[in-house]
Structure formats: structure tokens, C-alpha cells
Image: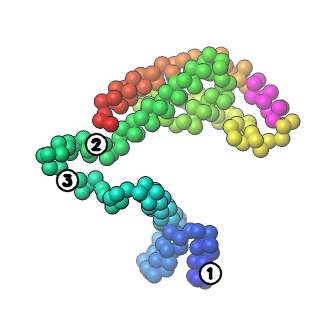
Amino acid sequence: MLTEPTLEKMKTMRLDGMAAAWAEQQQQPSTTQLSFDERLGFLVDAEWTHRENKKMGRALREAKLRLAQACVENIDYPARRELDKAVVRQLASCRWVQEHQALSQAQQARDLARAIADGHIGVVEGSWKIRDLAFAGADVDDQMRALFMPFVAVTSETDHFPIGEERANWDPDVLREKDREIRAYDEACRAQMVSHCRAFAARVDQDVARLTESFMSTPK
């Protein structure tokens, strides 16, 4: 295999991180003992890291920070500054951001379930939106798995329908026919899904209350 042409193609495709990692692999005889999947995994990881580092560098340049190289580990904690080291570390973990995202996703899922139950949104459309949220706010226990499965089942049975952004790619005449099929599916399973939606919303309400309490008690 010709190394140079391959490297040039990678660079042309702007896979600089992958190209550097691949060139490094060529210099390490031990990599021949790795399987193809393992070597490919290392290359993908290298490209991912390279892009994330570039993104971070660009963000730092655009931020025009006075101390661009500053980091939490280098913070001084003299008494006159009255800084609480525990609070600073907790803020640096960004846990409060994650909790806010989890809370927001849980609220969206609960509201969608109620909208399905009240007939404000179709079963198919609402189920896909709930599944796509994949919110982290709910405890992953047997009860939540059971309550979530009906939405997964709906998406599994309707993955041949035009949903979301892909609708723009469908022929208008075919789209109208598929919409009739979606409405028929909605009508056939609505009565059964209403009870599922109400039970799901009630359970997520508990998670929202827990997440709200946790979020409000976290230093911002």
C-alpha cells in the first residue's frame, strides 16, 4: 500500500487528525498486532480529538480572554478573596448545566405525553419526539422502562412513515397518502396510548420535582 498518496487524500479531505495518527501507526510495528477494527477505532478517536481541540482553540480565540491559558487548577485561594474551593470545583464540573439539560428534557417529554393524551399532537409525531429526546431526567428503573416502551414500539412500527425533516424529500402526492396512513394509525392506537401517556407524564412529574430540587440547591 502506498503511504504518501493515502496521506495526501486524507489531508485533502481535511482528516488531518486521522492522517497524523495513521502516519504514526506506520512507524510503530506493534500496531500490526491490532485488528482492523481496533486500528480504525484509534484513527477515528484521533480525528475526533483533533477536531474538538481545534473547536476549543477557536472558541478561546474568539472569546479574547485576558488570560487565555487560565484554568481552574491554577486558581489561587487567598483568604482575602473569600473563595470557597468546594463551590468552585462544583461549578467547574458543570453539573448544574447537565442538571438543567436533564430537567428541560424531562419537562419536554412530560408535556409531549400530555399533548398526545389531550389530542393536541398525533401519537406518531409525539412518540418520535419523545424517543428523540432520550432525556436523562428519569431514573432508569423497571417502571420507567415499561412506561417508555410504548413510545419505542410506536416508532418501531412507523419508521417507514415520513417523519420530521425528511418530509421535505417526499413527493407531495405520496406524502398525502402517507399522512392518511399516519392518521389511521393514530386513530387505531390512540385510546390505548392515552393511558400510557398519562401514566408516563405522572412518573416524569416526580423526576421533574426531584431534578428541580437538585438544580435549585446547586450553586450557580
Q: Quadrant of the N terminus?
A: bottom right
Q: Quadrant of the C terminus?
A: top left
User: Is 82 left, or right, of 17 in this rendering?
Assistant: left
Q: Which residue is mark 2?
A: 90
The quarter holding residue 27 reads bottom left
Secondary element under disc 1, as helix, strand or loop, is helix
Q: Which residue is mark 1?
A: 5
User: Is 45 left, or right, of 1 in this rendering?
Assistant: left
Check the image and report above or below for 3 versus 108: below
Residue toward you, 206 or 96: 96
Could you say where residue 184 lies in the image, as x and y percent from the top left? 76, 23
**Which residues lie in the magenta part?**
174-184
Could you say where residue 212 lies in the image, as x and y percent from the top left? 38, 27
Mark 3–mark 1 Cα distance, whole angstroms, equals: 51 Å
Mark 2 or 3, closer to the camera: 3
Can residue 159 be seen in this snapshot?
no
The residue that appears at 51% across and 21% down in the rendered structure is: 201
Which mark identifies residue 76?
3
Q: Is residue 179 magenta?
A: yes
Residue toward you, 132 or 192: 132
Check the image and report above or below for 144 versus 26: above
